[in-house]
Amino acid sequence: MTDSPLIFWGRCRSGQRWFWAARDFDGPREHGWADTEERAVSAAGAAVERLAGERAATVRVLHGVASQALRDVNAEKRKAKPADGTATDVVEYLYGVIHGHEGNDFTESAVTFRVTKKTARRIYYVRREGRSDDPQIGYVDRQQLEETGEVLNPSAGWWAPDFRLYAGVPDLEPRQADAPDLTQLKAAMAAAHPDRGGTDEAFIAARAQYERASQMVSADG
């Protein structure tokens, strides 16, 4: 009798593309990149079928599998670079979260942001790599991040994956969609105001989100 394998799969952002991974808990694994999230999910599904073979498998969605596999791949690439006799700085990352919905489920997946510089007060990171030599740089309070393991970055906008940044990979679990937190949305709206370092566009978007959430709560009540 053939044992039923336990297979995990997930996907996460990798620059402008999507990275996917699938692994048999006790066996082989596969990974790759795709241009869109839909293609990444499709490729991961095909990999799950290959890993299962003719067996009836138990399949679980765990996007942290992809985040960990991507870190492993990047680590191997760095080790594979030929030595040129010069010192090489260790690449460090901050971690954010991409939010979404799948049916009634609220989904979250981790995304990495490359650290470019550290000072006594700030940690600078690449918000968007893009294709130019002039990437968009952001920064967060170093002391708060190192003391608590996470830090809010209101200047990024509440909708951005770097609105809240983590020192390590966040522990993400799928859950049922919660009612909107008006207190948090109101705080994000205030933080996005130009008088507090935000922009007109960020404040308008945050206010629209708060107003929509208020209407939802009023309708449910």
Image (tube, helix red, strand yellow):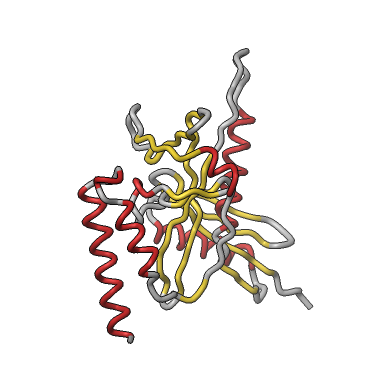
Q: Residue at x 68, y 69 (%)?
A: 6
Residue occupying image coordinates x 23% and y 64%: 208
Near-viewer residue (170 or 195): 195
Establish if 215 lies above or below 16.
Answer: below
Which residue is at a point 37% across and 52% down the rendered structure image?
160
Figure check: 197 above or below 40: above
Total residue callouts: 0
Look at the image and tell me in which quarter the C terminus lies. bottom left
From the viewer's perspective, tell me whether residue 204 is left or right of residue 8: left
On the image, which quarter does residue 76 sit in?
Answer: top right
Of 166 and 145, which appears nearest the observer? Answer: 145
Looking at the picture, how far across and down is residue 32, in whole percent? 52, 50
Residue lying farthest to the bottom in this orientation: 221
Residue, far front:
195
Q: Position of residue 145 (x, y in %)?
A: 54, 44
In front: 7, or 97? 97
Q: In screen coordinates, is 82 left or right of 97?
A: right
Q: Could you say where residue 112 lies in the image, as x and y percent from the top left?
A: 49, 45
The location of residue 198, given as percent across then percent down, is: 28, 46
Q: Is residue 112 left or right of residue 209?
A: right
